[in-house]
Amino acid sequence: MNYNHLLIIDPQYDFCDPEGSLYVPNAEEDMKRLSRFIREYGHIDEISITMDTHQYYQIFHKLFWVDKNGNELPDFTEISVEDLLDGRYKTSNPDHLEWAKYYINKLDQDGKYNLTVWPYHCITGTLGASICEDINEAIKSFATSKVEKVNYYFKGINSYTEHYSAMKPEVEYHSDFNDKSLCNVKRPEQRNTDLLKSMSQADNIYIGGEALSHCVANTINDIIDFDVIDLSKLIVLTDTSSPVNGGEMLSQIFMDRLDILGIKHCKTTDII
């Protein structure tokens, strides 16, 4: 009998509720469909949930940055290598400027997004960080009917790096960064080995959550690139995930990659 693992990416209030600080359009409907899938599809054996977990002082929040006149940056400001070289933006704490330069250069070198100043979101201990009600009720039903635990994975705790993917941070933070000789040392890649191991033991891995353009896409892209899980196991639930505002093209690029690689994707209604 097949063993089915459901991975839910960041089903949290700030993304999934229209009152959330970083609401993803249509996310509340995505979560309704995903919660129905959990309740009505009787063959889920394991559920893993990732959760964005931040504080106010993070490299992608406005508290971290000021403009050249010392003014706070607006939400959704993008910061490029050129912005730092020109002195247009700088860190509010001067001690973190060298890391910020390294960080943004590394994003550019790796072909990743420019750093975006996101609204404060998923702040530890706040409503915004909590799992949305529909999913909470569905996983309660799963846990009580199966008499089984749910796995929770917290990401984004480190203030000095973004963590879109559930698998690894955007840039690996070096606590010894001030020792410049260590910056070019090849280090073991930081991977979510516990989640990878758990998923690798499944026959089917269903994936949904928010947002398709960012955290879902980056998580699955890392799974693909790590090449440690049989890609034929992956099934992306397309009616349980939506892009952030302006992220439609990123979502399409991601979906095109799935098609090129032959990775399965479907709606929950195709299964239940």
Image (cartoon, grey):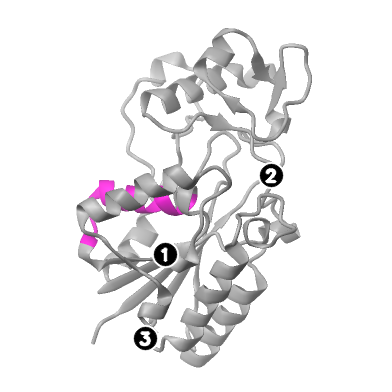
Q: State whether residue 28 is above or below residue 117.
A: below
* Image depth: mark 3 or mark 2 in front: 3
Q: Was residue 254 drawn as part of the magenta stretch in this picture?
A: no
Q: Which mark is residue 238?
A: 1
For the residue carrying disc 1, how many other residues have a C-alpha within 10 Å: few (<14), some (14-19), or many (20+)? some
Q: Mark on residue 43?
A: 3
Q: In what element is the residue under mark 1?
A: helix
Q: Seen in the image, is 159 located left or right of residue 188?
A: right
Viewer-closest of 39 and 24:
24
Q: Residue furthest top?
A: 86
Work out how far the residue at label 1 is from the one at label 2, CA to CA, in angstroms: 30 Å
In the image, the segment drawn in magenta is: 215-231
Q: Are marks 3 and 2 in contact (CB under 8 Å)?
A: no
Disc 3: CA contacts within 10 A as few (<14), some (14-19) or many (>=20): few
Point out residue 214 in the picture as x, y percentages from the top left corner: 48, 47
Mark toward the start of the polypeptide (3 vs 2): 3
Which residue type carries mark 2? Gln
| Kind of residue sitting beneath label 3 | His
At 58% across and 46% down in the image, what residue appears? 245
Which residue is at 72% across, 12% downward? 68
**C-beta proximity under 8 Å, tags 3 and 1:** no
- Residue 99 in the image: state x and y as whole percent: 54, 22
Q: Main secondary structure of the magenta part?
A: helix
Q: Quadrant of the N terminus?
A: bottom left
Query: In this view of the protein, which residue sits in the foreground, 185 or 19?
Result: 19
Q: Which residue is mark 2?
A: 55
